Amino acid sequence: MEIRCVWEHNGDDSLLYAVDLIGAYTRGESKETALQKMPAEAAAYLRWQGGAIPDSFEPVIVQEKASALTVSDADSDVLFEEEKAPLTLPEYQRQKALALRSAQDFLALYQAIPDPDKSCLPQRQSFYGPVPRTAAEMYGHTKGVNDYYFGEIGVGTDHEGSILACRQRGFALLEAQPDFLHKPVFLGSYDEEWTLRKVLRRFVWHDRIHARAMWRMARKTFGGGIPDPFHFG
């Protein structure tokens, strides 16, 4: 199976995104490391989707973005060339369902953590401040991007309630806007380009970053018995 990838990098530090597996990604200290990780990420993603796993994967880079951001901490601003195109209603419905399933699975993982305020991880700083250590911190951070992402395409919402509830509310507000499937490319915060396709991808991508971190932290902190709704294992 060929995996079309977008490569975003700052020097050697690399983020690699699977164009057709919306939200799937790898990170590495080099392009080669990120490429080597992609088959495992693609397999985990397909297991999460309930799809068949091919015998082999072949990552192919179709777009490159050199960035000044701290991509080693998953700071990103790339807009895929394909994300500039308007969405059809069936495409939107499929991608919206994916973003909502991702939120639902993230919530299920969080609710299964025995103690959301306990963690064995050491403190660490990133470009946005202290890295979330506990399940509660990871959940709060991930839910908190809801109003940020929607706001970048002109949808005023919030992140009250559960991560699933606030995302559902954001989509409802989006759909109340006329011609919402044909929104232009927005120049948002920090001069970053955004589209609806990008917002849909970023929700799943950001969920996967912190769901993987939460799942790994919980296994180290509490041992077995932690569910794996995203099929990272």
Image (cartoon, rainbow, N blue to C red):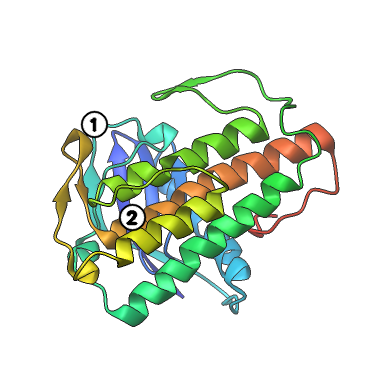
Q: Secondary structure at mark 1?
A: loop
Q: In the image, is 218 to the left or to the right of 56?
A: right
User: In the image, residue 27 lies at what x, y percent?
Assistant: 45, 43
**Residue carrying label 2:** 199
**Kind of residue indicated by mark 2:** Val
Q: In the image, is 59 to the left or to the right of 138?
A: left
Q: Secondary structure at mark 2?
A: helix
Inter-mark Cα distance, 1 to 2: 21 Å
Q: Which mark is residue 148?
A: none
Q: In the image, is 115 to the left or to the right of 153?
A: right
Question: Where 138 falls versus 80 (above or below)?
Answer: above
Question: Where 187 falls versus 129 (above or below)?
Answer: below
Q: In the image, is 133 to the left or to the right of 222?
A: left
User: In the image, residue 40 lies at what x, y percent?
Assistant: 57, 59
Question: Where 35 falls versus 66 (above or below)?
Answer: below
Q: Earlier in the sequence, mark 1 or mark 2?
A: 1
Q: What residue is drawn where x is 34% and y is 59%?
A: 173
Q: Is residue 86 visible?
A: no
Q: Which mark is residue 68?
A: 1
Q: What residue is drawn where x is 58% and y is 65%?
A: 43
* Of the two numbered discs 1 and 2 in the rendering, the one whose residue sits closer to the viewer: 2
User: In the image, residue 152 lies at what x, y percent?
Assistant: 25, 46
Q: Judge by depth and name the residue closer to the eye, 134 or 29.
A: 134
Q: What residue is drawn where x is 58% and y is 77%?
A: 51
**Kind of residue indicated by mark 1:** Ala
Q: Judge by depth and name the residue closer to the eye, 24 or 3.
A: 24
